Amino acid sequence: MPRWRWRVLKTYRGAITIGQKVRHCRVEERVKTASAERQVDLDPKVANLLKEFIGKRTHGFLFESRNGKPLSSSNIIRRHLHPALKALGYINPYTGDHKAGNHAFRRFRNTYLRNETSCPKGLRDYWLGHTGESMDDLYDRVRDDVEFRKKKAEEYGIGFDLPSDLPLIVPKVPRFTAKTKAAKAA
């Protein structure tokens, strides 16, 4: 099964706009379904953390290699996610070890919104990129109600507390500047 990661086209006003996907380290200029093209509204704490991580960048991948290419999902999992989960003492209830994959984040978010908040199904489906199953879903205009989505993103939070001394788990990869590229070419 392919591993999907989304390219960040824009970040603004506490949301990430998704309009492309990366599969096997290659950018595909389309998404799997029409519902996958969306804005993911962020809790303000997460938005501030990402703003700090992104710095002055205005486009590209949220997490990218030194030369701006997409990171390999297997490298992210092996080098960053698994060691972080081990350090946190996480035990996967199904495998008995500390390992989990990228999809665990999506499953956690769905479970949290469904069981711990009063999140309407239409909003949850929109944030997760799910296609509606009924006429009610077709008529739901939550996609257009930005203020409602932002208010609910802040109200629901992320499902856990961020430590105040949180180190960024994903390393800040130094970006090449025009000067470094020119030096390498010479």
Image (cartoon, rainbow, N blue to C red):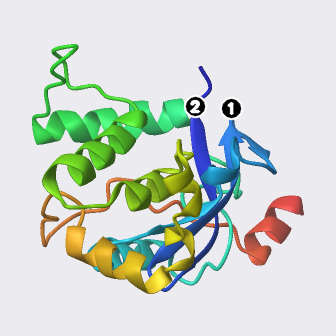
Front in this rendered view, residue 31 or 140 = 140
Q: Mark 1 points at which residue?
A: 24
Identify which residue is drawn at 52% across, 60% down: 173
Residue at image coords 57%, 63%: 139
- Secondary structure beneath label 1: loop
Q: Where is residue 4 in the image (x, y as percent from the top left)?
A: 59, 38
Q: Which amino acid, by three-letter code, is at mark 2?
A: Arg
Q: The residue tagged with tag 2: helix, strand or loop? A: loop
Q: In the rendered view, tell whether residue 76 sits above or below residue 183.
A: above
Residue 109 falls left or right of residue 147: left
Q: In this image, 91 relative to 62: left or right?
A: left
Percent from the top left, x then y, of residue 28?
79, 45
Task: Please give the name of the residue rendered at 45% of the width and 52% of the height, measured from the top-left corner.
Answer: 125
Residue furthest to the top: 95
User: Where does label 2 land, which residue?
Assistant: 3
User: Of residues 115 and 74, which is closer to you in this image?
Assistant: 115
Q: Residue at x 46, y 39 (%)?
A: 76
